[in-house]
Image (cartoon, rainbow, N blue to C red):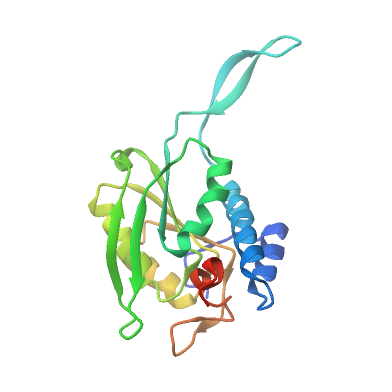
């Protein structure tokens, strides 16, 4: 694990909600709500270094200088379909954020990524892009999505996921060493079917009730 370049978000609320999401008894409604909540908490953590600038304001008591974001443009790109479950929580935290979509799926036989959709803001080269997908398993789909965004002009990308396998982290590290990975947990391994162990099952199926 020590060779992996990954940032673990270990905030107690994040870890608590992740445990609830892992439980097989957690139903679709609760899973969906927990994913929204944990996405907001994780986005709060990864945006802590956004630049600030001073501005002059007046409170009900007096004039003063106060801090505002320094015009940093941020974009959000969920990898379809499970990434959609992370959008609402992040939008609540950053309402002006622009949202693109990348459609990738993993072929169940080859486990290779297949692209089927891409729609992005026109100014992605000027934005810090937060790419989201709850699960980083083999890393194939995520790596392909990140390559696509770079081809479209993206220069500043962060990858945010809920649970990762060491194999997936390593794949992103090798294919995109410039991209920071944030996750709530790096789990044990992938099983023979390409699922993260212990993981939380298929995030898309649990999110949309298609089990």
Seen from the viewer's position, the closer of residues 33 and 143 is: 33
Q: Is residue 48 visible?
A: no
Q: Residue at x 44, y 34 (%)?
A: 72
Q: 7 above or below 90?
A: below
- In this rendering, does residue 18 appear at all? yes
Q: Position of residue 70 (x, y in %)?
A: 48, 28
| Rendering coords of residue 102 (x, y %) | 34, 57
Q: Is residue 176 above or below residue 67?
A: below
Q: Is residue 154 left or right of residue 6?
A: left
* Total residue callouts: 0
**Occupied quadrant, residue 18:** bottom right
The outermost residue toward the right is 61
Near-viewer residue (130 or 85): 85
Residue at 60 percent of width and 61 percent of height: 32
Relative image position of residue 190 (x, y in whole percent): 48, 83
Q: Residue at x 67, y 72 (%)?
A: 26
Q: Is residue 186 left or right of residue 103?
A: right
Q: Residue at x 29, y 59 (%)?
A: 117
């Amino acid at each position: 694990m020590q060779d992996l370049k990954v940032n673990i978000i270990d905030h107690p609320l994040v870890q608590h909600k992740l445990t609830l999401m892992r439980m097989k008894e957690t139903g679709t409604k609760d899973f969906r709500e927990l994913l929204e909540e944990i996405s907001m908490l994780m986005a709060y953590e990864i945006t802590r270094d956004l630049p600030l600038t001073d501005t002059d304001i007046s409170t009900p008591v007096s004039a003063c200088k106060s801090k505002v974001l320094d015009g940093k443009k941020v974009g959000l790109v969920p990898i379809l379909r499970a990434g959609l479950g992370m959008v609402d929580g992040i939008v609540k935290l950053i309402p002006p954020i622009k949202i693109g979509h990348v459609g990738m799926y993993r072929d169940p036989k080859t486990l290779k990524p297949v692209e089927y959709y891409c729609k992005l803001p026109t100014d992605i080269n000027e934005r810090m892009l937060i790419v989201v997908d709850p699960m980083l398993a083999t890393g194939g789909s995520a790596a392909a999505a990140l390559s696509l965004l770079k081809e479209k002009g993206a220069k500043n990308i962060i990858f945010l996921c809920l649970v990762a396998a060491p194999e997936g982290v390593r794949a992103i590290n090798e294919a995109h060493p410039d991209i920071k990975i944030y996750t709530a947990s790096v789990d044990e391994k992938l099983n023979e079917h390409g699922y993260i162990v212990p993981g939380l099952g298929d995030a898309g199926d649990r999110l949309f009730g298609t089990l």
